[in-house]
Amino acid sequence: MSGDYEQFIYKIKIKSGIDLALYKEAQMKRRLTSLYEKKGYNSFEEYFSTINRDQELFNEFLDRITINVSEFYRNNKRWEVLEKNILPKILQRTKRPKLWSAACSSGEEPYTLAMIMSNFMPLTDVRILATDIDENILARAKLGIYPERSLQEAPEDMKKKFFTKDGSFYKVSEEVKRAVSFKKHNLLSDPYGGPYDLIVCRNVLIYFTEEAKDLIYHKFSQCLNPGGILFVGSTEQIFNAGQYGFEAEDTFFYKKCL
């Protein structure tokens, strides 16, 4: 690893918590060299010196290093169902529901959940556990800075209430960030904790084998309270929900049988 790049990744880790050494060096170095050359810089040292002073350029750098397929209120009709039909029933059973956003990627999902919960209770009372296996993506999530495209489906009132515009990027408010705790977690091997009242795990299990999915659904069921809900992605319908102790509550929402 060249000294210039080595120094760059060291400084980025101190500044943001993101460890570029965990990425494939050749690919990441090529991507970042192309980025700084386009901007007219001649070295990683010169590039860091600038992004360290210029928040907009730093945000652009963050956007470039993460391959982000998540977004706020993704498939927003499903989030409407959560808000109007699912959460009121959960809140009838408990005033302080235990909420888990599993495989949360860069944070859009748990932050969306926090914003929706703010319609039911003060954000100071909301506690959401958000987990992912990738430490870099978790570091990005904790920063809470997103490109405009991540907010395409977010309602205008939520954008106004919970985001600050910073150039072409948006920063999540501190009160929303405080409602979410991020933690590294491997769905296949780590303990699940609980019991939870709602687990959100969307657009992730499509990447797992049938055997792995089977294991994860069983574990989700075991760590949910009776009547608790599993919210899955729009390509992840569970056709044999009964074998995991679930029944369909709504499309893509599964309730643990009482």
Image: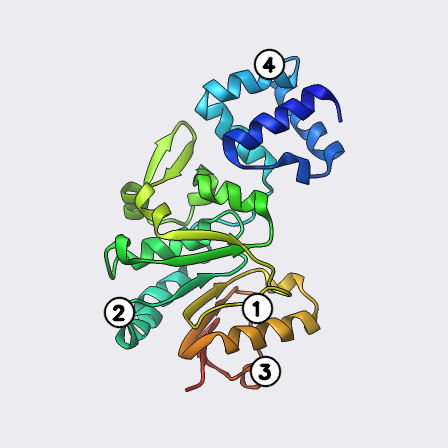
* Residue 3 lies in quadrant: top right
Instruction: Please state which amino acid type lies under the numbered disc 3.
Output: Asn
The image shows residue 41 at horizontal and vertical percentages of 62, 14
- Mark 4 in CB contact with mark 1 (< 8 angstroms): no
Query: Is 91 on the left-hand or right-hand side of 12?
Result: left
Query: Is 122 on the left-hand or right-hand side of 146?
Result: left
Q: Nearer the viewer, mark 4 or mark 3?
A: 4
164 above or below 51?
below
Question: Which residue lies under the disc numbered 3?
Answer: 240
Query: Is 69 on the left-hand or right-hand side of 250?
Result: right
Please state which of residues 170 and 19 is positioned toward the viewer in this rendering. Answer: 19
Question: Which residue lies under the disc numbered 2?
Answer: 95
Q: CA distance from mark 4 to mark 3?
A: 56 Å
- Mark 1 in CB contact with mark 2 (< 8 angstroms): no
| Residue visible at 45% across and 80% down in the picture | 256
The image shows residue 36 at horizontal and vertical percentages of 62, 20
Number of on-image labels: 4
84 above or below 76?
below
SS at mark 1?
loop
Q: Which mark is residue 236?
A: 1
Q: CA distance from mark 2 to mark 4?
A: 52 Å
- Mark 4 in CB contact with mark 3 (< 8 angstroms): no
Question: Which residue lies under the disc numbered 4?
Answer: 46
Instruction: Please state which amino acid type lies under the numbered disc 1.
Output: Glu
